[in-house]
Amino acid sequence: MQMTDEYDLIVLGGGPVGENVADRAVQGGLTAVIVESELVGGECSYWACMPSKALLRSGQALRAARRVPGAAEAVTGELDVPAVLKRRDEFTSDWDDSGQVDWLSSAHIDLVRGHGRISGERRVTVTDADGGERTLTARHAVAVSTGSDAVVPGIPGLQEAAPWTSREATSAQEVPESLIVVGGGVVAVEMATAFASLGSRVTMLARSGVLGAFEPFAGELVTEGLRELGVDVRTGVSPARVDRDAAGVTVRVSRDDADDDELLADEILVATGRSPRSDDIGLETIGLEPGSWIGTDDSLRVPGTDWLYAVGDVNGRAPLTHQGKYQARAAGDAIAARAQGGPVEDRAWGRHAATADRASVPQVVFSDPEVASIGLTEAAAQQAGRRVRAVDVEFSSVAGASLHGDGASGRARIVVDEDRRVLLGATFVGPEVAELVHAATVAVVGEVPIQRLWHAVPSYPTVSEVWLRLLEAYGRDSA
């Protein structure tokens, strides 16, 4: 393909977010180039969403079969770990991005390999692997979609101990006999679940508890599930020092309520948060702070500029792949509209606004039991000054859940705005609840009145019957 040095749009970062920004702009009639220093397809394709779920799926399927009489008797062995890892490798295309590069070509998006830095207004300088430089100029916009990196906290000895982050965990070619997981969030929970399923002895150090950003019962039920898998979950515990020698990794931990202790494992995984990948992309040349989250308006444009956009994790709005792609569609369409002098609908819920980032973000934790949520928790809604009522239902009261979950425990909660009688949030914890969250997302985003939801009849017997039980618990008269 003929390469040029001037484009309508330059995108820094070739992950799913950057790909979608460029694709929407091209579909809107613009030219676009992606600058990428690693694999096209980004974190999600090779070190996050896809490989992590591939590692989790086999264990989930095995446990589900073992819960069902008849199927349980047919299960005679344990997981075939090499087969699980091979399947994971297939989902990452063996870390080969040829297919993704071919897609860029088919979508008429150019690719420049190398590290891109903003070097002035609408200008990006790319340094290739050999040190050569090339300067690209954007007629209309530059979109920063560089993502985020795992945070490695400043615990004495930790850096020298060569800790795993999510990248090393999801791309591991061998399963360690023992693993210490530091953190209690989504990545920590999913990787503890995966490696316990694959045979590791896992210890989780979760100082502030498990899944603290969710409804409290989600963390409680997932903690129970982790312990049933054999994970040693320790809350109120912090690593005080980490050392590695020939015997493995030694972690001295401090507790809030007991004497210090020492743990020994083959590997240590740190999953304590993410930071924006913005420290070496030239932000200082345009008056922004390197290493910072890049703030935007709802059309993903950086305030004070008419050409710079920040899309996906790097803006800190809602650091999830599906929200990043949602932002990308809004940003790419907005860039094309502005470039061609068309109307820009950046009002709330407009075509060019990422309104859902504010309080309508869905998320699934692929733990055992699964957690699926959308919108505000009860506590977050109250902190926002809303007059709310939370309604809980146990899945044991739902025929479809009992049928499909075979005794697995679970709970659902809806958070209702009592003044407007619409849902502000919903949380489901239990077997196969991931597929429930989109119905809840439609209800929250669409602000469907509770009274109208009574007419959305769930099929029998399905897990979706939980909606009927939740509405019954809320009360027709209340609606």
Image (cartoon, helix red, strand yellow):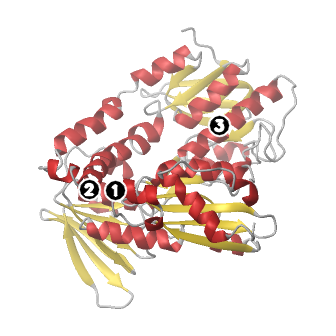
- First in sequence, mark 1 or 3: give its number: 1
Give the Cα separation between the discs numbered 2 and 1: 6 Å
Write the residue at 18% across / 45% down: 81
Can you identify the residue that label 1 sits on? 191
- Is residue 157 visible in the rendered structure shown here? no
Q: Going by the image, does 241 lie left or right of 20?
A: left
For the image, the number of numbered tags is 3
What kind of residue is marked 3? Ala
Can you identify the residue that label 3 sits on? 328
**Residue 430 x/y as whole percent:** 43, 61
- Extreme-top residue of the structure: 2
- Is residue 51 visible in the rendered structure shown here? yes
Between 50 and 298, the one nearer to me in the picture: 50
**Residue 74 x/y as whole percent:** 15, 47
Element marked by disc 2: helix
What kind of residue is marked 1? Met
Specify the quadrant of the image occupied by residue 11.
top right
Q: Going by the image, does 280 lie left or right of 191?
A: right
Q: Is the Cβ of the residue at disc 2 closer than 8 Å to that at disc 1? A: yes
Can you identify the residue that label 2 sits on? 195
